[in-house]
Image (cartoon, coloured by chain):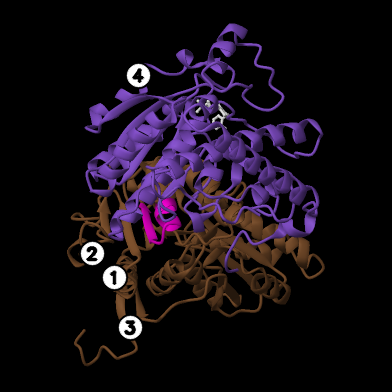
Chain colours: A brown, B purple
Amino acid sequence: MTATTETAQTRSLKTWQGINQALTEEMERDERVVLVGEDVGRPGGPYGVTRGLLDKFGGLRVRDTPISEAVLVGLGVGGGAVGLRPVVEIMFFDFAMIAMDQIVNQAAKFRYFSGHSMPLTIRTMCGAGGPNGAQHSQNFEAWFCAVPGLKVIMPSNARDAKGLLKAAIRDDDPVLFIETLGILPTRRDVPVDEDFVLPIGVAETRREGTDVTVVAIGRLVDRALEAAETLAEEGISVEVIDPRTLSPLDTDALVASIRRTGRLVTATEATAPCSIGSEVCALAVENCLSELKSAPVRVASPFINVPTPVPLAEWRAPGPDAVADAVRKVMQG
Amino acid sequence: MAESRTSTVESPSGAEAAQARYRLMRLSRRFEETVHEQFHEGNVPGPLHLSIGQEAVAVGAISPLRVSDAVLSTHRGHHHCLAKGAKADRLMAELLGREPGYSRGRGGSMHVAIPDIGLLGTNGIVGAGIPIATGAAYGMQAQGRDDVTVCFFGEGATGTGAFGESLNIAALWKLPLVFICENNQYVELTPQSVHVAGEIHRRGESFGMPGVKVDGNDIDEVLAAVGDAVARARAGEGPTMIEAVTYRWFGHYAGDKAAYRESDEVEQWRAKDPLVRSRAKLDAAVADELDASAEAEIQAALEFALNSPITGPDSLALDHLATT
Ligand SMILES: Cc1ncc(C[n+]2csc(CCOP(=O)(O)OP(=O)(O)O)c2C)c(N)n1
């Protein structure tokens, strides 16, 4: 793409580049923003997301740490308490288990106890998408949505990733920002405007439809859109909603759509028990029981751990076909 | 009340400063004795961990600090809070579950954080302040400030994994951090010999930081050691590990009769009372005055708390988020 065809409005970027841009722009804009994590400096992280930042901002603001996840988040909590706006990278979501106390008991409680803001962003990566196996691919987003005091964001494309990460960094609360490995290499048109910031807590209708509401997150959004195309040919009109922010969840938008269509399918890469899908189904039953024409269906990964071989991991993750099958099922019910 | 008391004793030397430190120790002792009574009256709606007998560590260690320096405290933190400048009346209100408390009476003594005076939190999770202290020290370094962070923890907390992680990072990055282990000999209901291998003050040595052991019942010894460590930290020379050996007179929590200890042992330590020792260095008439003024502050604090509304469910929904 040449500079001339690249309009002032948008530019095509891969998701990891959108994240990199958000970090760069926010660090340029506000010197209180710092980035700490394992390999975030010279190597730029396992997928290059933080490439170039060390050279731009120096070793005090882009800080490689030892393998110390509990203290990594502590660095963010303590730094946030004394005036920084830290961005902490936990390489894989799986490793957040080691830092649980600092995330759940410390960061998410700070404001409750002190009345002071905790402008901390924790970035992490989840999901299958490489030969990473059962300890490097897990989706724990729902666990963190059960914690008051924490915001949870999971974007589904480069544009949202950039706009929402900027929002997270500018937000005065602790935000868990979950990057889905499966979308890091996918492209979108991303606004060039440095103040392109998306609102936290607002869902986006990605396709309008009248027969079925599909609430999809992360990697499943594009797959749900693909399924919707196929289903349109069969005469089924699917509405696809991407909550984008999982906590607080935009319940008004979800409930309004479910009431309109009377049918619900949820689609996540996580396993079904106690998932975001479960939460949205519960919302539907609580708020839309009289409008529901059939029982909601959750599309999710089978309740098994993630296999290491890529073809097996891909087999486990729900694809467009699984979403389409679920839609056909709720249409019959 | 007591607005005249500065939040920290800015100058650690001189007779006036020594008097202020003694008064703060007395205030801490009387504060805890008073909340202990209130606990038995049924007025404290939460657990209470007393540090009576340990006052010299908190006051000695916090004296060399400024308001802009940070302190991370523990579950046994009343004396740290008072020394860093928490007001006795609002702290009392917090412990008694009253609206004007620092956390509007919903947190209790293990959840007090007053960032405006550098108190970044007491904590209900043993050892959890250590990573946060490391982060605060990193924040100061990254902002080019010459402030320092002092991190208190008990000997039991040295068993947590993040303790070692924090020492490594603090030493690698030469953070302006002073680690202070208040070794009061007991970890909940067991002696430290069940919990701690080797000597705590030497734990820093393998990471390349100095380790110092002091008599935690001697405020001057604590003050000197922490003063040196703070100066080192401010000069960019990195962290120090200090072990202050002391003793808690009462049980682990209010209500714990501490039957797991020999009374001889308790008596021996009571004889080393840090208050008696520092009082002996003052003019008796001056000390009497300081005692009286601390007492008046505590009585006023108690009255303030008891006359304040009890926190009800209305305030519980309060703002755990700045923005929604
Ligand atoms: C992570 C964690 N584990 C266990 C406890 C329960 N607990 C509360 S205080 C305490 C003992 C702490 O001992 P120490 O660190 O020596 O401090 P001290 O009580 O002696 O001041 C324990 C085990 C806790 N609060 N947090």
Above or below residue B110? Residue A319 is below
- Chain designation of label 4: B
Report how far apart the C-alphas of labels 4 and 1 lie in the structure.
45 Å
Residue under numbered circle 4: B199
Determine if marks 4 and 1 fall on one subunit: no
In this rendering, the count of numbered labels is: 4
Horizontally, is A85 left or right of A292 in the view?
A: left
The mark nearer the N terminus, 2 or 3, is 2
Residue under numbered circle 3: A192
Horizontally, is B23 left or right of B139 in the view?
A: right
Tag 4 secondary structure: loop
- Chain designation of label 1: A
Q: Is mark 4 within 8 Å of ligand 1?
A: no
Q: Position of residue B218 (x, y in %)?
A: 44, 26
| Residue type, label 1 | Thr
For the residue carrying disc 4, how many other residues have a C-alpha within 10 Å: few (<14), some (14-19), or many (20+)? few
| Residue type, label 2 | Leu
Report how far apart the C-alphas of labels 2 and 3 lie in the structure.
19 Å
Residue under numbered circle 1: A24
Residue under numbered circle 2: A53
